[in-house]
Image (tube, rainbow, N blue to C red):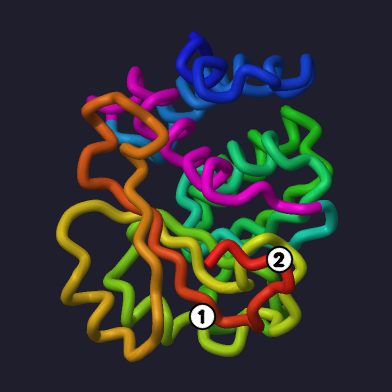
Amino acid sequence: MTDIIEKYFPNLQHTQKQHFDALWDLYHFWNNQVNVISRKDIDNLYLNHVLHSLSIAKLLQFKNQTSILDVGTGGGFPGIPLAIMFPNAEFHLVDSIGKKIKVTQSIAEELHLSNVKCTQERVENLTCQYDFIVSRAVTILPDFLKWTQNKVLKFSFNSIANGILYLKGGDLSEERQQLGKKSFQYGISEWFEEDFFKEKYIIHIPLGNKPIESMY
């Protein structure tokens, strides 16, 4: 079932493969109790949710000790797949809906993901700062920027500046214009050939300083 993951990430460790394999049964089990993925979409788990989340790993290889906040994580996307991919980075998954966080927490515990922390909370109430904030289309970009204000650490040590990595599809030109900040748009179809990824993007909003080895 994880062939689509190994197609694009052929160098996975054995433990990572085991974790990705386990997601199928875990999400099917939990989705029968709590609807964290559309019933019509659950059989597309690996393409539409896991691989979509992992597009961030094509843009950026998180260095060890990088801290990442996943806002509106729902059932754990993109946070759970990224935590499997980057076991030496630290992930904080938050959602305001308790039953969704219960699912995410249970899956993280089943997989023994010691680099994952799950919290039921509104992001505005968090007081910590992180290297990156990730999310999958929970609202329009200007509103998301307001929600996450002052939650990004300024010192950048990855290959791109600390900031927001936002997964969203469609024409985002107006939203990006309303940001009042520089942003960069990356087409996921540059990495993944499946039709699902056409017009799906990662938006990077730099909020930290420019790293010494910058990609721009």
Image point (46%, 74%), residue name: 205
> Closer to the N terminus: mark 2 or mark 1?
1
- Residue 41 placement, left or right of 18: left
Q: Secondary structure at mark 1?
A: loop
Image point (72%, 23%), residue name: 16
- The residue singled out by tag 1 in the image is 148
Image point (36%, 43%), residue name: 188
**Which mark identifies residue 70?**
none
Vertical comparison of 194 with 143: above or below: above
Q: Secondary structure at mark 2?
A: loop
Give the residue type at disc 2: Glu
Give the residue type at disc 1: Thr
- Residue 96 placement, left or right of 21: left
Which residue is at the front of the view, 181 or 114? 181
Q: Mark 2 against mark 1, which lies toward the viewer?
A: 2
Q: Quadrant of residue 20?
A: top right
Q: Quadrant of residue 123?
A: bottom right
- The residue segment tinted magenta is 39-63
- The residue singled out by tag 2 in the image is 213
Which residue is at the front of the view, 168 or 97? 168
